[in-house]
Amino acid sequence: MSAGQRPRQRLGVNIDHVATIRNARGGAHPDPLRAAHIAIDAGADGITAHLREDRRHISDKDIANLKEQLTRPLNFEMAATDEMLAIACSHVPHACCLVPERREERTTEGGLDVRVGQNHLTRCVSELKNVGSRVSMFIEPDLAQIDASHRIGADVVELHTGHYCELALANDAAAMQQELDRIIAASKHAHAAGLEVHAGHGLTYTTVPVFADIDEVVELNIGHFLIGEAIFSGLSPAVRQMRQVMDEARYPTHLRRSA
């Protein structure tokens, strides 16, 4: 596929950990909404926020402010619980990404088991779509999980890239290639089934290029790394650099003019 035919890959920026910093001391600073505006100005195509049941970072007020004031799509990460379903149906974000959630975990670990939770998840997907939100399933790059996501009516699958990123830290090239091959196969399988394909978790400037180069992956969602980099360089430069890394991987220099 030539650069001119290749669709631009979207960048979603997760601003949860701006709220984590705010909540460490209390008060109103730093404001996740301000971070969202800065990220959008720097090239983000959408904003992701995860309202956890324990409210450890993003708050109900944050969600209301983001939905009211954002000029780009809001992706609401949520557990598939009645409480979260009621909040999502009240605010109607552009998209809802269903994720597993355990109170003792530091971050979302692993993908959602759609096969096991199929009956309950079908109801959640139906209710969210009925109010006008697109629905994404955060899953492992597993063909059976993709098929289950398709059966219950999801619009999108977001493939978990965390294992690949852990292998990259360990510099295990053979295992990295094996995991990448699995993600590529899953991307093609999901695309063929009519699902939109996103990817995310643990991505950095170093690990993003291989996923930016997968035609079927139309969106990458990145949060913790960008907020961490913002401590050193500022949020706007961090997002701009990520946008540049993605574009350079998607459109090699010799093809850039036709993109």
Image (spheres, rainbow, N blue to C red):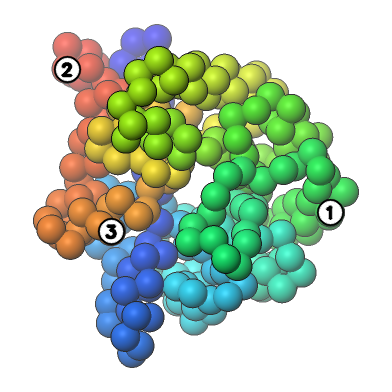
Amino acid under disc 3: Ile
- Please state the horizontal and vertical placement of residue 2, each as a whole percent of the image: 34, 10
Of discs 1 and 2, which sits in the foreground? 1
In this view of the protein, which residue sits in the foreground, 144 or 44?
Answer: 144
User: Is residue 224 placed above or below 3 in the rendered structure?
Assistant: below
Residue in view at x 68 percent, y 56 percent: 132
- Quarter of the image with the N terminus is top left
N-terminal of the two: label 3 or label 2?
3
Q: Which residue is mark 1?
A: 120
Q: Which mark is residue 227?
A: 3
User: Quick check: can you spot residue 62?
Assistant: yes
Q: CA distance from mark 1 to mark 2?
A: 47 Å
Q: Residue 20 vs residue 115: left or right?
A: left
Q: Which residue is mark 2?
A: 253
Q: Where does the image place residue 83, in percent across and percent down from the top left?
A: 71, 73
x, y percentage for residue 247? Answer: 26, 30
Q: Residue at x 57, y 66 (%)?
A: 104
* Left or right for 203, reference 82: left
Q: Using the image as rendered, state which of residue 215 and residue 227 is in the foreground.
A: 227
Residue 173 location, quadrant: top left
Residue at image coords 17%, 62%: 231
Which amino acid does the dot numbered 1 rest on? Answer: His
Q: Which x, y percent locates residue 92?
A: 62, 65
The disc labelled 2 sits on which kind of residue? Thr
Quadrant of image for the C terminus: top left
Most extreme residue toward the right is 119
Circle 3 SS class: helix
Mark 3 vs 1, N-terminal side: 1
